[in-house]
Image (spheres, grey):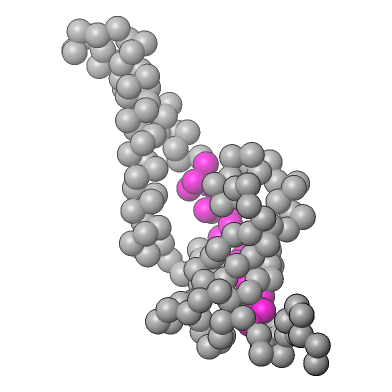
C-alpha cells in the first residue's frame, strides 16, 4: 500500500487539499517523464476526504490500496491505447465509405477514439463517479500544524 506524507494547504467542506513533495519513488517510476502530476515543480496537490478533521498546516499520512492503484493505471494507460488501435482500425475500414485515404482515416479515427476515451476518463474523475476506493485516503495526522516550529521562530 503506497504511503505519502503531506501538509494540508486548505480545507473546503469535507475535503482537504494536501501538498505532497515529490518522493524518491517518482525517480524510479517509468512514467515520470509523462506524468502530468509530476511536473517541473517538486510538489503535488491532492484532494482527499477530511475524515480526520485535519486543519491547515497539519502533516498527514495518505495511502491508497495497491490493487486500486493498479486498476487506475489500467484505466489511464491501457484503455486509451486500446481505443487508439480500435479507432485506427475502424477508420481504415470506413475509409472507402467516405472516399478518403485509409491512412488519413486511420489517423483521424484513432485520434478521435483516444480523445473520447480521455474525455470520458476526465468526466468520471471530475464528476466523482469513480468510487472512493480509487481515491487516496487520509490515514492519520502525524502532527498538528500548531505544534510545528516555523522557520525564524526563536522560541
**Does 77 sit above or below residue 148?**
above
Q: Nearer the viewer, residue 121 or 9?
A: 9
Residue 53 in the figure: left or right of residue 33: left
Residue 33 position within the rendered picture, expressed as x and y whole percent measured from the top left: 64, 39
Looking at the image, can residue 67 be seen? Answer: no
Q: Quadrant of the C terminus?
A: bottom right
> Residue at (66%, 85%) from the top-left corner?
145
Looking at the image, can residue 48 be seen? Answer: yes
**Does 49 sit above or below residue 109?**
below
Magenta includes 55?
no
Give the overall secondary structure of the magenta segment.
helix
Q: Quadrant of the N terminus?
A: bottom right
**Does 34 sit above or below residue 73?**
above
Residue 40 in the figure: left or right of residue 51: right
Report the magenta residues as a range: 58-77
Q: Nearer the viewer, residue 43 or 64?
A: 43
Amino acid at each position: 500500500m503506497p504511503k505519502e506524507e503531506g501538509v494540508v494547504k486548505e480545507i473546503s467542506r469535507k475535503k482537504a487539499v494536501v501538498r505532497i513533495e515529490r518522493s524518491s519513488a517518482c525517480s524510479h517510476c517509468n512514467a515520470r517523464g509523462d506524468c502530468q502530476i509530476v511536473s517541473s515543480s517538486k510538489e503535488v496537490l491532492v484532494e482527499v476526504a477530511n475524515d480526520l478533521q485535519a486543519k491547515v498546516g497539519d502533516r498527514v499520512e495518505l495511502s491508497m490500496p495497491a490493487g486500486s492503484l493498479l486498476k487506475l493505471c489500467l484505466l489511464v494507460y491501457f484503455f486509451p491505447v486500446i481505443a487508439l488501435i480500435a479507432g485506427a482500425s475502424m477508420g481504415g475500414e470506413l475509409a472507402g465509405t467516405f472516399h478518403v485515404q485509409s491512412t488519413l482515416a486511420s489517423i483521424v479515427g484513432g485520434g478521435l477514439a483516444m480523445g473520447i476515451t480521455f474525455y470520458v476518463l476526465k468526466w468520471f474523475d471530475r464528476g466523482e463517479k469513480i468510487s472512493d476506493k480509487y481515491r487516496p485516503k487520509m490515514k492519520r495526522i502525524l502532527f498538528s500544524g500548531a505544534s510545528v516550529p516555523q522557520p525564524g521562530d526563536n522560541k
